[in-house]
Amino acid sequence: MAKMMPHTHIIGTGSSIPKRILSNKDLEGIVDTTDEWIIQRTGIKERRISVKGERESTTDLTTQASVKAIEMASISPKSLDMIVVGTVTGDRMFPSTACMVQEALNAENAMAFDVSAGCTGFLYALSMADNAIQCGTCKNALVVGVDRLSSVVNWQDRGTCVLLADGAGAVVVTSATEQGGILSTHLKSDGKLWELLYSSDGNNHIPKILQGIDIKPFHLRMDGNRLFKRAVGYLSSIANEALEHNSLTIKDIGLLVPHQANIRIIKAVSKNLYIPMERVYTNIHRYGNTSSASIPIALDEANRENMLSKGDHVLFVSFGAGLTWGASIVRWSI
Ligand code: ACO
């Protein structure tokens, strides 16, 4: 008899964001911008920035989000076989954030590694865990998306510094025979487009009101205009690919949880997919673009706000540096 493939179910979610709020008004004192321009062109009203000495390093934020997800999942950290973290802003070049968090959690039985896929890092990480569970190499996995883009922002570049922010989101997934959970994940990349968003050497200037933030010796460069157009097209087509693969239509999707990069991108994708904004989760006005963390933070909030019921289909879509992009459909099972 053919062996039944296990299914990967999300059984816990958690998130952690820094305490320090950086408002659009604060940014008016840093670069030549206005609250009105930022809200109209991006939908962002404020964002969170991690500060040194506040236990808000990449490892700290990851650990805090993971503890909440593990608590919800009601498992012991020792029962985790895998920790996979999507990030491009780990505290160190090596070891991985996943290994640092393994120590913090006492998750001594897990293999631990990071995935670098820009803002799509969480979906890439989720897919790694899903594959390991389906292959039977893993029963319980912790999947995290975390970034501290404040550490790679060029605070003199008004085209990027108003967008980017810090945070972490986590899920615990487990192997089960029951149908549902992650139905499929679809990942793409196109290295020919790396120049649309990349890190560049350079000493970063720290504005006065942000003294005390942790800055890396390189910063982010972005061609926002070209990225915007690609993002709308790629997110719409990858969402349709995921729907077709599962013989679903957009009417079957209870909640779309997109990467939170720009409210105009999200609205354009919702229009292309014919899904009303009432069924699209957004928190970009409060957190800005938290990169790999944006989907798991939004998912955790939607979950804790009781917006998801057992059996609902949730569609994730994301894009980021690489370029990378992806989609995943989950039949909710908590
Ligand atoms: N305040 C005021 N004016 C600004 C600002 C600002 N913060 N930023 C740019 N402008 C100006 C520009 O200089 C330009 O002025 P000009 O006409 O005199 O030359 C004008 O506004 C229009 O600039 P555009 O770049 O055309 O503005 P656009 O409407 O495209 O918005 C934005 C820019 C918000 C960056 C948009 O292109 C965008 O969101 N792109 C996608 C970015 C993205 O998704 N990045 C993340 C992907 S990966 C990840 O998540 C890390």
Image (tube, rainbow, N blue to C red):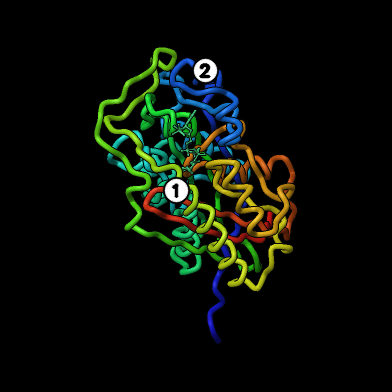
Residue 26: assigned label? 2
Classify mark 1: helix, strand or loop: helix
- Kindly check if marks 1 and 2 are in contact, taking CB atoms under 8 A apart as contact: no
Where is residue 104 drawn, in percent x and y? 42, 35
Q: In this rendering, which labeled residue sits more in front, label 1 or label 2?
A: 1
Look at the numbered disc 1 and say if its residue's Cβ is closer than 8 Å to ligand 1: yes
Query: Quick check: 17 above or below 294?
Result: above
Element type where label 2 sits in the image: helix
* Residue at 59% over, 43% down: 264
The answer to which of 57 and 134 lies nearer the viewer is 57
Q: Nearer the viewer, residue 317 or 228?
A: 228
Q: Position of residue 38 (x, y in %)?
A: 55, 30
Depth check: give the residue in front, 227 or 70: 227
The kind of residue tagged 1 is Leu
Q: Upstream in the sequence, badge 1 or badge 2?
A: 2
**Residue 227 got which mark?**
1
